[in-house]
Image (spheres, coloured by chain):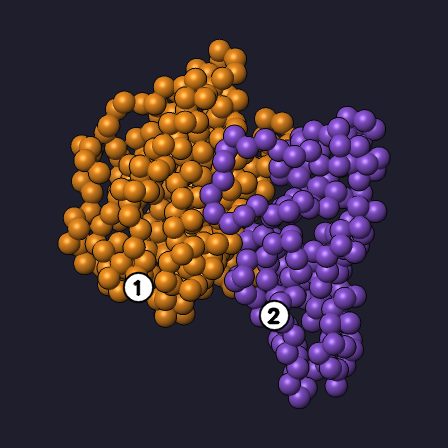
Chain colours: A purple, B orange
Amino acid sequence: MLSASEVYGVLNTVMDPEVPVISVVELGIVRDVAVEHDAVTITITPTYSGCPAMREIEADIRTALLEHGVRDVQVNLVLSPAWTTDWIGPDAREKLRAYGIAPPGRAEPQGLITLTRARVPVACPFCGSSDTRLQSEFGSTACKAIHVCNACRQPFDEFKAF
Amino acid sequence: MTESSFQVAAPRSTPVANPLFEYVLRMGDDRLVLGHRLSEWCGHGPILEEDIALSNIALDLIGHASSLLALAGEIEGQGRDADRLAYFRDAVAYRNALLVEIPNGDFAVTMVRQFLFDAYSVLLWDALSRCEHEGLAAIATKSLKEDKYHLRHSSEWVVRLGDGTAESHERAQHALDAVWRYTGELFDHDAVDDAVAADAFIAIDHDALHSLWLTMVTDVVRRATLTLPSDPAMRRGGRRGFHTESLGHMLATMQIVARSHPGASW
């Protein structure tokens, strides 16, 4: 039988299907691991409410644990506390950058927003320039925005602060 | 609300069997119907980025609807899950506001409708994130984060269209004039609101919400160089199942697969 830390070790090999360089643990969506006799209960939280990858992530977690001899895997979904990109650690941010995705800045405080707020430019993950422009806050997946680097002319994804 | 109306608002005394179910259903239906409307743009967006953005926003709204309808089903306690509620109710059983079911029209109608709804939704979530109902507060906190992105997007489009070319200005003004009459219903207060305030301590001050909303909307409309419609007549009925013809057509498309092949999975 696996210990809780061994379960975390297994989960660290389960990659985000849409950003396959960081694991579900590094993404911050694994909220709890409970081991009792032969049963393992994993509590995860969705990144975005409509994220279509959640079912696949749940299936991947189940498969990985079954492959490591766990017979009874339960995956629970919780909404609170709401997931934030602030839970992504420095190592995972560096992996994102190396993969060509600008890592998220600090998440906005909870509550309401100013609609006329000026945006902070996002540094290009390829050449490092801050001379970039936002193309769209909605990108290839719910968690990404599209930017273009004015210096190296490269379009790039940003893992948006959330 | 003091304005006159074409359809009478629900009398405050109308009793409802399960007010909390009804309350959550209304919110879920708003987001399911609007999410489906936005999904109709998929493959038809004016530019690729906008096609992607509208599909993203649709996905978020359907995600919110899924959480809300699941919660509604739990509250009801009759074994209906989110899919059952979404696919096996007819238009008369839907409780969405009329605003979200009106056809997409041109891009200006879609964006103005989206902005008016986003501004309402962000304020509602902010208030509900502090409510006493744990499940609803969790959905509110989560959805608020996503809706803020939607609001920024739709408000910027309203300004861009209104303060754009002569044609985009004209279309944006036309959209605002056409859609405005459906906004009053969002802030109606009836027996359901009274009951959830008394029983579940979910008390939203609709007048305060309306006044905050109007401040936000007025500011964006002014920056868009548009004129706020002065016609006070509001259309309502959706919250009680009296819908426009459009909802039935939309649901026919949305529900056909689930109803033709009950229990199918893929």
Q: Residue at x 44, y 44 (%)?
A: B122
Residue drawn at x 71%, y 41% is A158
Q: Is residue B101 above or below residue B201?
A: above
Q: Label 2 lies in what chain?
A: A
Give x and y (percent) for residue B190.
22, 50
**Would residue B90 be seen by someone viewing this image from the given angle?**
no
Q: Residues within 10 Å of mark 1 (few under 14, many from 20)?
A: few
Instruction: Tell me the residue that label 1 is attached to.
Output: B200
Q: Chain of mark 1?
A: B
Is B190 situated left or right of B150 in this image? left
Task: Find residue A43 and name its label.
Answer: 2
Figure check: A66 above or below B127: below
Q: Position of residue A138 (x, y in %)?
A: 62, 39
Residue B215 sits in quarter? top left
Give the image quarter of residue B233: top left
Coordinates of residue A107 in the picture (x, y in percent): 61, 47
Classify residue A21 as left or right of residue B176. Answer: right
Question: Would you call the spot at circle 2 few (<14 residues within 10 Å), some (14-19), or many (20 or more)?
Answer: some
